[in-house]
Amino acid sequence: MRNTHTPVAVEGYPFIAGFAAVAALLALLGQFLHFGFFILAALFVLLALFSVFFFRNPERSTPAGENVVVAPADGEVIFLGKVTEPHTGAEMEKISIFMSVFNVHVNRAPITAKVADAFYTKGKFYDVRDERASFENEQQGLVLETENGLRMVVVQVAGLIARRIVCYAKVGDLLTRGRRYGLIRFGSRLDVYLPLGTRIDVVMGQKTVAGETVLGILP
């Protein structure tokens, strides 16, 4: 998997380098043409610094436990409840996590499991706090199966601004709890579907930390 030992996700390199290059060019023009170019250069320096901040990729300490499910994303819990998961058609416990542009956007595997299936749906770009986003927005999902045969689904959902979902995991891969498996830029949502009977350990409005916050315990 990518980004295992990088303090900044590699997907951010083109943005950082591009903004920095433009800033350098504008600063150079400012020396020979007009002071106004320095102001524009400062703006692009700020954009480069924001890109470093947005694509930051901190290390995390993942809790142990065979049936422990951890948050796949930093953010805020905006939905809890029983629903019918669209891809499998099964009734499951759903937890939705909203990621603002200020959250870390690297996503992590919620549990140690094999990728049994993967799906991509090209769709719309509603604000991810709108529940329609779970069903109509562009999304990339993984069906994960544990060693005990339990299945859960984790879905990366693009939002109003986010137009690029990155997922490294493929069908057949074995993901380890807390392992980085993708990201979304810029501002988005993660939907986690857990088997009925799962003990849910988060509440509405709770802040989550990817790879660390325990969402629940599988039955």
Image (tube, rainbow, N blue to C red):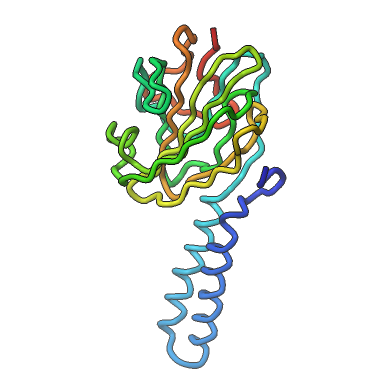
Residue at horizontal 59%, vertical 26%?
212
User: How many numbered marks have been drawn onto this rendered protein structure?
Assistant: 0
The one nearer the camera, 68 or 87, is 87
The one nearer the camera, 168 or 10, is 168
Position of the N terminus by quadrant? top right
Q: Is residue 70 left or right of residue 119?
A: right
Q: Find residue 138 and report its horizontal and vertical position in percent.
A: 38, 43
Q: Find residue 28 and report its horizontal and vertical position in percent.
A: 54, 85
Residue at horizontal 49%, vertical 81%?
26
The one nearer the camera, 141 or 26, is 141
Position of the C terminus by quadrant? top right
Q: Find residue 55 and report its horizontal and vertical position in percent.
A: 55, 50
Q: Is residue 72 left or right of residue 37?
A: right
Q: Residue furthest right?
A: 5
The one nearer the camera, 186 or 155, is 155
Residue at horizontal 52%, vertical 88%?
31
Q: Find residue 4 and report its horizontal and vertical position in percent.
A: 70, 43
Residue at horizontal 33%, vertical 45%?
123
